[in-house]
Amino acid sequence: MDSPNPLLLLLLVLAAVAPSSATPGVIRLPVDRHALYDRPVIGIVTHPGSGIHEIDPEGGNSGSYIAASYVKFVESAGARVIPLIYDDCRENLLGNLSLVNGVLFTGGSKKHGQYRDTIDMIFQHVKHRKDCHGDPIPLLAVCLGFELLSMNVSKDKDILTRFNAYNEPSTLQFPDRSLISGSVFESFEPELITKLQTRRLAMQNHGEYVSTVQAKNYSIICTQWHPEKAIFEWGQGLPPHKDDKAPHSEDAVRVTQHFANYFISKARQSTNRPCEDDVRRNLIDSYYSKFGQSQSFDKVYVFP
């Protein structure tokens, strides 16, 4: 991947094997307690396909899905989830966006068509909420989500290059540790930052390899790695010849927990106060979930 756009990106973390010798400093998380909202809602964009077609041929690639690990990731930090169905009409999408305090773009493979158009529209909506309404709702873009935002920001559809990092954990390297303060890593204990640099705690499953970026002027975080997998994916769907390589150590779990807590702490700072009845009518709990032998997910929510 080419260099990140300097206008938007503040933090750059590289996935690598070699450890860094830099000494970690003290990390603190400043928060305006008076602005916090204790009922945050996150909108997760669905991905085209069934998510379970490996064992459900009848399901084919129709509809869309959300891997349950993303839902659990959000809920583990004290937020609720509303699905943003990518091929829903614009009116419904905007209606559900009005109910959320943050947005999550999942991993996947679809880089074209209506799905990309929806991702671009929601990205512009997040920026508009900050620029025009002063509501800095956070956006977390994982794997494919990161790639699509890179294409959007750079205006370069060919910005991505290939790198083989499928189903492999890695270390994370911090070229400029002074940028940790104010970033998604600022609440990590210094010893956990050191472990991130020396132990393979970040699960990779992709072909592009800038690891983590964060926007300067927006609450936007992008990871090429999968912070949700360490706790919520166990490889139950993997074929017998493949191993579950997601790290499940206590340190890897702590990384996931810190990441989820940071993301939802930003959602708590959103000024949006949606109608509770409207939120409840649209929560993901009313949709169908299914355990499946997918190569990537233990469980998915499916949407017709």
Image (cartoon, grey):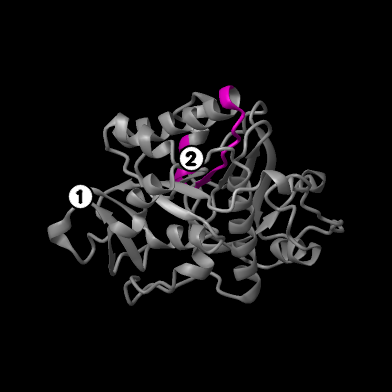
Q: Quadrant of residue 192?
A: bottom right
Vertical placement of 258 versus 249: above or below? Answer: above
Q: Are the residues flagged by discs 2 and 1 in contact, CB closer than 8 Å?
A: no
Name the residue nearer the viewer: 163 or 283: 283
Q: Where is mark 2, residue-wise? A: 147
Q: Quadrant of residue 242?
A: bottom left
Coordinates of residue 181 in the picture (x, y in percent):
79, 47
Q: Amino acid at mark 2?
A: Glu
Name the residue nearer the viewer: 58 or 155: 58
Q: Where is mark 1, residue-wise? A: 304
Q: Which residues are magenta?
A: 132-148
Q: Amino acid at mark 1?
A: Pro
Coordinates of residue 218 in the picture (x, y in percent):
63, 33
The kind of secondary structure element at disc 2 is helix
Q: Is residue 289 magenta?
A: no
Residue placed at 33% from the left, 71% from the top? 237
